Image (cartoon, rainbow, N blue to C red):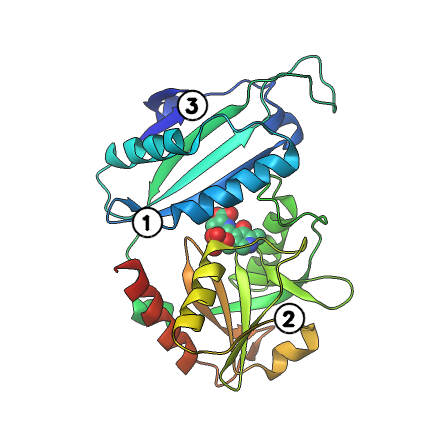
């Protein structure tokens, strides 16, 4: 297994960075997770646009141009035998000493990329769904940046595990549901898909974007609006969506069944549309 670090491919398990890296000391960095199907990068323009935006908002210089990024990803993919993969890429602000919250001028960003095998998705298995809990959204007010600082997400996931659930729906103090611990959320009611609007409280997910596109193509009503946690118990279906998990039904929430307690009809339709879109 290979990693790319600052211009060089090297064995992943021998790849090391400095303890003075601002990513390590301050969580001062951004990342992307990009799926690969049949050795082809999925939705790269959208992932790249989001990466550029995360870099711009944090004032971290982009170490490569778009073509160099794509060449790097393709070489990384081809160095591995797996047809389906997910690439992790991370850019931190770089190495600095002495320690200072204020970044020094002209730091050289640290670029790490490596890839992981992605198991093929089995509809029967996914249709069993997951159990979730609601949990306080303890994150900051710039969740639209794909920042490497994920402590609140990790804690939500731990809370889910402690409640014998697989994930958490995050809820802001005003009762608005934002997203899952590492996914966007959708509430289905009377054949319509509802999802929170894009703002600083959620990550603009690429899977969410594809779901929106498929809804438009197939005349399924898709509404972006605030969702209050009180609505969750009235939903016909609840879904989570991300690049690595695709679209998964939540069948139990806070130990109560969601809708019929089984994966819903619209989930099944969207799952099939998503597979067809991946394989187009
Ligand atoms: N997470 N919201 C959050 C907080 C996320 O971490 C993610 C993805 C998403 C969905 O985005 P996308 O559809 O582009 O994957 C939404 C990745 C997979 C991760 O951190 O591993």
Identify which residue, 101 or 198, lies in the foreground.
198
Kindly report the distance in space between the C-alpha atoms of the residues bearing marks 2 and 3: 41 Å
Instruction: State the quadrant of the C terminus.
Output: bottom left
Say whether marks 2 and 3 touch (CB < 8 Å): no
Residue 233: % across, % down: 62, 80
Which of pointers 2 and 3 lies earlier in the amino acid sequence? Answer: 3
**Residue at which label 2 appears:** 225
* SS at mark 1 in the image: loop
Q: Which residue is mark 1?
A: 118
Numbered circle sitting on residue 137: none
Q: Nearer the viewer, residue 155 or 174?
A: 174
Mark 3: few/some/many CA within 10 Å (<14, 14-19, 20+): some
Query: Left or right of 69: which side holds 153?
Result: right
From where the camera sits, is residue 219 visible?
Answer: yes
The secondary structure type at the circle numbered 2 is: loop
Q: Which residue shows up at 47% across the image and 54% down it? A: 206
The answer to whether the residue bearing label 2 lies less than 8 angstroms from the nearest atom of ligand 1 is no
Give the Cα distance between marks 3 and 1: 22 Å
Q: Position of residue 63 (x, y in %)?
A: 49, 25
Q: Secondary structure at mark 3?
A: strand
Give the answer, above or below, for where 14 lies relative to 178.
Answer: above
Q: Which mark is residue 5?
A: 3
Q: Are marks 3 and 1 in contact (CB under 8 Å)?
A: no
Q: CA distance from mark 2 to mark 1?
A: 32 Å
- Residue 248 vertical placement versus 137 (above, below): below
- The answer to whether one can see residue 264 in this image is no
């Amino acid at each position: 297994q290979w990693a790319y670090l600052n211009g060089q491919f090297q064995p992943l398990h021998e790849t090391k960075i400095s303890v003075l890296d601002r990513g390590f000391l301050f969580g001062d960095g951004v990342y992307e997770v990009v799926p690969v199907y049949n050795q082809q990068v999925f939705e790269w323009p959208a992932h790249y646009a989001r990466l550029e935006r995360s870099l711009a908002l944090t004032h971290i210089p982009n170490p490569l141009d778009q073509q160099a990024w794509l060449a790097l990803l393709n070489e990384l993919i081809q160095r591995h035998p797996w047809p389906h993969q997910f690439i992790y890429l991370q850019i931190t602000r770089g190495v600095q000493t002495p320690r200072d919250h204020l970044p020094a001028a002209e730091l050289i960003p640290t670029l790490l990329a490596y890839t992981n095998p992605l198991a093929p998705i089995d509809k029967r298995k996914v249709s069993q769904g997951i159990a979730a809990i609601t949990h306080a959204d303890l994150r900051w007010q710039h969740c639209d940046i794909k920042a490497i600082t994920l402590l609140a997400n990790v804690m939500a996931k731990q809370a889910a595990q402690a409640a014998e659930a697989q994930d958490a729906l995050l809820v802001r103090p005003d009762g608005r549901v934002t997203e899952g611990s590492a996914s966007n959320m959708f509430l289905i009611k009377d054949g319509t898909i509802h999802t929170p609007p894009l703002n600083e409280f959620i990550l603009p997910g690429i899977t969410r974007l594809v779901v929106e596109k498929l809804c438009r193509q197939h005349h399924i009503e898709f509404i972006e609006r605030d969702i209050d946690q009180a609505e969750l118990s009235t939903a016909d279906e609840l879904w989570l969506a991300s690049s690595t998990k695709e679209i998964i039904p939540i069948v139990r929430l806070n130990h109560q069944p969601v809708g019929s307690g089984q994966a819903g009809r619209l989930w099944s339709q969207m799952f099939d549309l998503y597979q067809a879109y991946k394989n187009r």
